[in-house]
Image (tube, helix red, strand yellow):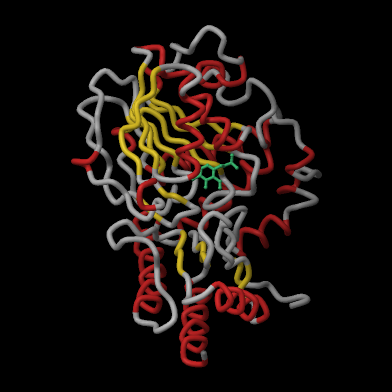
C-alpha cells in the first residue's frame, strides 16, 4: 500500500472525503491568514467563533433543523448521551420506552434503568437483531416521557425504514451511524444525537439536537456537564468544545452540499448499498443475514459459507486494498461500512472483487 490510500470500510472512525482532508491539510499550519492552526486557537477567538457559527448554520440548513431546536456540539461520544437522555428527559413522568435493536440501544436501555421505570417497547434479540420491529409490534406506553430508538444498528447492519408513531410521546434517536445520509423530519423528535466519527468528522465531537422546550427539567443530581440547559445557555461553550472536529465538520458539510445536500446523498448512498446487496444476493457463496426491508444502507453485513472462507475473503480483500471488512466479533462474517464519504468507485471495485472471489472459489 505505501503511499496509496485504501478503500477503508471501517465502521468508525471511518473515511472522510479526500477533498476535506486535502483542504484541512492545506490550512493546517495557518488557517486563512490567522497565523495559526485551528488546533491552536482560543475557542473564544473571533476567528473560531466564525467557524463555529457557520458550521452550526450549515448543519441547520442541510438537515433542515427548525426553529425551537438547538444544535449542540459536545464531547463525550454518543455513549455519554445514553446517560444524558434519561437524566434530562425522564423527570416528566419517570417512565420511558426503549426499542432494543442492537448493541448500542441495549446499552442505552440498561443505562436508563438507573434513572426511572423503563419499558422494553420492542426487541429484536429473538432473531439476533437481524430485523427491525414493525410499527404494530411496538408496545407503547402513553405515559412515557420519551420513546428511544437507534436509527441504524452499526454492528448488525439493520436500519429503521420508518419513523415510529408514538401519539405525541417525544422521539429520542441515536443517529450516530446514519445522520446526514437521508432526510429527517426533525420536528418529530425531542432529541437526536450522533457521534461524529462515521458521517461527520473525526472522533471527539457529538452532535446533539434538542427541542428547547424539553430542556431544563433535568434530575437534580444531573452532572453539570450533562445538562442540556447548561449547554444551550452557553451555546455549547460552557467549557472548551471540540474545536478541531467542529472545523472539520464544517468542511464535510461544504462537501455534502456539493453532493446535492442530504437528498442528493440519499440517492448516492442508496445506490451504493443496493449494488452490494445485489451482488451478495446473486452470489453462490455469500449471503446477507439481515432480513430484506430492514437492511442498512450504511453497514452491509454479509458472510460466506464458512468461517474459513470468511477469513480468506477478508485477508485477500485487505491485500487488494479493501480494509476493515471483518465483521464485528458478536456477528462474525464481514461488514462493509459505506458511509457518505466512501466513494462510489470504492463500492464498484468491491463489487467486482466479490464477483471474482465468488467465481474463483
Ligand atoms: C449507533 C451507535 N451508537 C453509539 C455508538 C457509540 O459511540 P461513541 O463511541 O461515540 O460513544 C456507536 C459507535 O460505534 C454507534 O455505532
Q: Is residue 337 or residue 189 the one in the foreground?
A: 337
Residue located 67% across and 62% down the image: 22
**Quadrant of the image where one finds ligand 1:** top right
The residue sitting at the top extreme is 220
In which quadrant will I find the N terminus? bottom right
Residue located 51% across and 27% down the image: 111
Query: As displayed, is residue 170 above or below residue 27?
Result: above
Residue located 47% across and 43% down the image: 58
Q: Is residue 299 or residue 73 the one in the foreground?
A: 299
Q: Quadrant of residue 330?
A: bottom right
Q: Is residue 297 or residue 315 the one in the foreground?
A: 315
Residue 256 x, y percent position in the rendering: 47, 56
Q: Quadrant of residue 70?
A: top left
Residue 317 x, y percent position in the rendering: 61, 78
Image-based side of 316 in relation to 71, left or right: right
Residue located 45% across and 59% down the image: 298
Query: As displayed, is residue 85 above or below residue 249?
Result: above
Image-based side of 278 in relation to 85, left or right: left
Residue 245 x, y percent position in the rendering: 64, 43
Q: Quadrant of residue 296?
A: bottom left
Residue 167 x, y percent position in the rendering: 20, 28
Amino acid at each position: 500500500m505505501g503511499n496509496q490510500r485504501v478503500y477503508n470500510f471501517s465502521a468508525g472512525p471511518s473515511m472522510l472525503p479526500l477533498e476535506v482532508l486535502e483542504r484541512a491539510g492545506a490550512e493546517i499550519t495557518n488557517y486563512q491568514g490567522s497565523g495559526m492552526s485551528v488546533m491552536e486557537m482560543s475557542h473564544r477567538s473571533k476567528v473560531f467563533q466564525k467557524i463555529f457559527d457557520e458550521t452550526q448554520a450549515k448543519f441547520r440548513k442541510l438537515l433542515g433543523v427548525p426553529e425551537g431546536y438547538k444544535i449542540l456540539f459536545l464531547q463525550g461520544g454518543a455513549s455519554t448521551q445514553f446517560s444524558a437522555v434519561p437524566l434530562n428527559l425522564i423527570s416528566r413522568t419517570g417512565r420511558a420506552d426503549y426499542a432494543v435493536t442492537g448493541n448500542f440501544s441495549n446499552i442505552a436501555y440498561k443505562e436508563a434503568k438507573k434513572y426511572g421505570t423503563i419499558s422494553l417497547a420492542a426487541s429484536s434479540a429473538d432473531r439476533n437483531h437481524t430485523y427491525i420491529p414493525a410499527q404494530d409490534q411496538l408496545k407503547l406506553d402513553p405515559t412515557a416521557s420519551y420513546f428511544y430508538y437507534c436509527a441504524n444498528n452499526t454492528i448488525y447492519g439493520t436500519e429503521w425504514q420508518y419513523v415510529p408513531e408514538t401519539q405525541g410521546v417525544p422521539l429520542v434517536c441515536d443517529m450516530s451511524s446514519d445522520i446526514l445520509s437521508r432526510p429527517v423530519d426533525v420536528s418529530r423528535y425531542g432529541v437526536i444525537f450522533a457521534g461524529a466519527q462515521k458521517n461527520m468528522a473525526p472522533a471527539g465531537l457529538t452532535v446533539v439536537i434538542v427541542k428547547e422546550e424539553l430542556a431544563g427539567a433535568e434530575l437534580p443530581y444531573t452532572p453539570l456537564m450533562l445538562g442540556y440547559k447548561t449547554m444551550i445557555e452557553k451555546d455549547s461553550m460552557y467549557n472548551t468544545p471540540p474545536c478541531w472536529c467542529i472545523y472539520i465538520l464544517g468542511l464535510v458539510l461544504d462537501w455534502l452540499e456539493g453532493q446535492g445536500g442530504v437528498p442528493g446523498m440519499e440517492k448516492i448512498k442508496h445506490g451504493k448499498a443496493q449494488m452490494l446487496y445485489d451482488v451478495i444476493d446473486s452470489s453462490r457463496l455469500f449471503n446477507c443475514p439481515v432480513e430484506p426491508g430492514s437492511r442498512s444502507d450504511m453497514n452491509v453485513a454479509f458472510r460466506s459459507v464458512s468461517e474459513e472462507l470468511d477469513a480468506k475473503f477478508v485477508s485477500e480483500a485487505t491485500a487488494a486494498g479493501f480494509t476493515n471488512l471483518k465483521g464485528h466479533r458478536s456477528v462474525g462474517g464481514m461488514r462493509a461500512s459505506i458511509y457518505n464519504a466512501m466513494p462510489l468507485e470504492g463500492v464498484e471495485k468491491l463489487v467486482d472483487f466479490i464477483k471474482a472471489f465468488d467465481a474463483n472459489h
